Image (cartoon, helix red, strand yellow):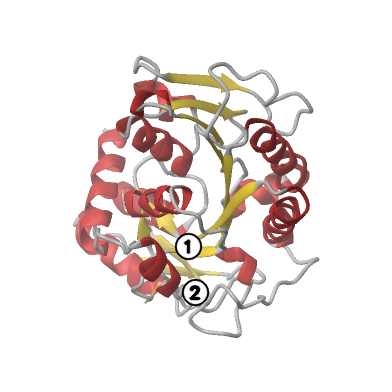
Amino acid sequence: MKGERDRRAVVTGGAGFVGSHLCERLLDDGWRVVAVDNLISGAEGNVAPLLDRPGFAFLRRDVCAPDALTDLPGGPFDLVFHLACPASPADYLRLPLETLETGSSGTRNALELAARDGARMVLASTSEVYGDPRVHPQREDYWGNVNPVGPRSVYDEAKRYAEALVTAHRRARGTDTAIVRIFNSYGPRMRAGDGRAVPTFIRQALAGEPLTVAGDGSQTRSLCYVDDTVAGIVALAESNLAGPVNIGGEEETTVLDIARRIVKLTGSSSPITFVERPGDDPARRRPDTTLAREKLGWEPRVDWQEGLERTIEWFARRAA
């Protein structure tokens, strides 16, 4: 039986926002970790503090390449986390083919590695598989309302296909897999220019610029601080659930209210302005997290004010 220090994990997208926090959590828990990232939307600076830690390795590779995961150092592995994928609208609209390829070839490569090593494979999926939902809050058994040829389809359908591929691998080959659907995670290491609401509003507020709210700001989101997101991912990995399992915040708030909260917490005098709302932008978004609470014992621990304060502090230090 493996000792505490012999457990090995691979994190694709390990230099990304959530991926880098996951790598850090795994190291803290005694895992040896190999992070794989091609840096098209991640940043090596996210894992720079980890490079000197024992048991951590970073490889700049495209997870979609045929041999990207066949010769990783430090194997065989016990866990394979597949987080690689452009996740913000700015990124997946800029990289539509790469996004689809990561959901298909990248997912297949991660599954093949897990099957080879007898590892458990965890797919990081998204609330976007629900599209612009007609069921509220969103339960895991809801099939979604997705426009397959709309502006967001490259991301939505990449994740839906990845879920189908993971499920087929589990049924046909017996691969130990799990699917986590992540809702509106935020926190330090988000890119200021990635186009998502929280980092955009914080950057604008700290710079004294107008906060640009899409539409009238009445669309809702359910924010989840990144530490809580990662705790949910780890809890699922350490369980025997196949999922999918929703991991996200339980407080539903409007985008306009998020902007107002950030203005208040930063002490900014920035006004709020309204811009055109993107096509297929979901009107409401809140997870039903009953399954995660009952089966994983998971629930968010960091409330919105503490989470936003930590995130603002991190952005302010970088701006300084």
Q: Quadrant of residue 61?
A: top right
Q: Provide residue 249's location: percent of width, then percent of height.
A: 37, 66
| Vertical placement of residue 317 versus 300, above or below | above
Instruction: Give percent across and percent down for residue 167.
Output: 70, 57
Residue nearest the viewer, comparing 192 with 187:
187
Q: For the C terminus, which image quadrant?
A: top left
Determine which of the numbered discs, if any, sits on residue 183 in the image.
1
- In the picture, the quarter occupied by the N terminus is top left
Q: Residue at x 66, y 49 (%)?
A: 92
Q: CA distance from mark 1 to mark 2?
A: 8 Å
Question: In the displayed structure, does residue 189 sit left or right of residue 71?
Answer: left
- The answer to whether mark 1 and mark 2 are in CB contact below 8 A is yes
Horizontal relation, residue 235 to residue 316: left or right: right
Query: Which numbered disc covers residue 285?
Result: 2
Q: Quadrant of residue 140?
A: bottom right
Residue 248 horizontal side relative to residue 68, left or right: left
Could you tell me the amino acid type at mark 2?
Arg
Q: Residues within 10 Å of mark 1 (few under 14, many from 20)?
A: many
Residue 261 left/right relative to 121: left
Instruction: Name the element at disc 2.
Output: loop
* Residue under the image location 62 percent in, 36 percent down: 118
Q: Is residue 43 above or below residue 86?
A: above
Location of residue 225 in the rendering, given as x and y in whole percent from the top left corner: 34, 55
